[in-house]
Amino acid sequence: MPYITVTALSHTGLIRDHNEDSLVAGPWTLCGTVTENPQTLVFPLGRPLVVAVADGMGGQPAGEVASALVVRQLASSGPALDSEEAVRDALKVCNHAVYVAADRDPALVTMGTTVAGAVVLPESLLVFNVGDSRVLGASPDGLRQVSLDDSPPLPPGQRTTPIVTQALGGAPQFSAITPHVTSSPLAVGDRYLVCTDGLTDPVPEEAIDDLLRAHDGGRAAFELWKSAIEAGGPDNITLALIRIGE
């Protein structure tokens, strides 16, 4: 019987004083805490399974509150996310929920978060994002980005930017979002990496590709985290590796 493994890890990094990232895998959430070792969960392939990361916006209040709110909302709605339209609607609900929470507490005004992830269906994968957290597909042909960054165009020679053009929350007044959602066929052996920019900013895509070619599961998650730490660990690092097994 086909199954799904999700190997997840979340870490503060070396510079930040706390973790503003959160993660969801099915009904399981990890919010603003640290996993000392990669954790692997196994799910049957069948009903929709949502796997996502949310990166609380740095430089603004309560990023960890916004990211936790979003992944918990996705965990609750996950079993119903069976179409692109359902995913778009769920992300719009998340955006509204962030603003409602901020309106209730002056200390939370302008809190926001990015989100990126995938919903695993029996025969397809729904990839989604708002912001610059990413979903990457790993195959023998190489690594490919299947999410779409909400970032301004980069000048020649610049690989990253801290600026996002769209997020859940993050503004003094409500701002609507246009989530990126795409569908692709799913097959046994497929692997996807869902991660915050605490991994992709310090570690070049070529290095991530090399590590995913050499390792799988918990060892792959550990090596990816290690690479971000060796590159200075400038931000929170959260990742989830999805694999379709049989």
Image (tube, helix red, strand yellow):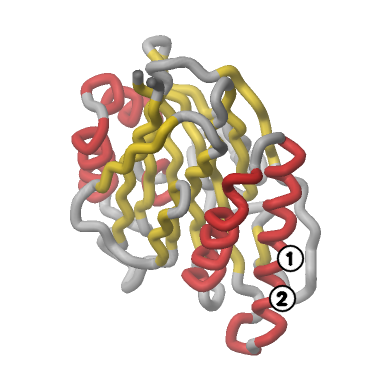
Q: Residue at x 22, y 38 (%)?
A: 218
The picture places residue 49, in percent across and down from the top left corner, at 51, 40
200 relative to 31, above or below: above
163 relative to 44, above or below: below
Q: Quadrant of the C terminus?
A: top left
Q: How many neighbours does mark 1 have within 10 angstroms: few (below 14), some (14-19), or many (20 or more)?
A: some
Q: How many neighbours does mark 2 have within 10 angstroms: few (below 14), some (14-19), or many (20 or more)?
A: some
The reply to whether callout 1 and callout 2 are in contact (CB within 8 Å) is yes
Q: Residue at x 39, y 60 (%)?
A: 30
Q: Residue furthest bottom?
A: 106
Quadrant in the picture for residue 124: top right
Q: Secondary structure at mark 2?
A: helix
- Residue 153 image label: none
Residue 158, can we see it?
Answer: no
Quadrant in the picture for residue 119: top right
242 relative to 13, above or below: above
- Residue 100 image label: 2
The picture places residue 136, in percent across and down from the top left corner, at 47, 31
Q: Quadrant of the N terminus?
A: top left
Q: Which residue is mark 1?
A: 96
Residue 153 versus residue 50: which sits nearer the camera?
A: 50
Residue type pointed to by label 2 = Val
Residue 88 versus residue 178: which sits nearer the camera?
A: 88
Along the horizontal axis of the image, is 133 left or right of 98? left
Residue 169, can we see it?
Answer: yes
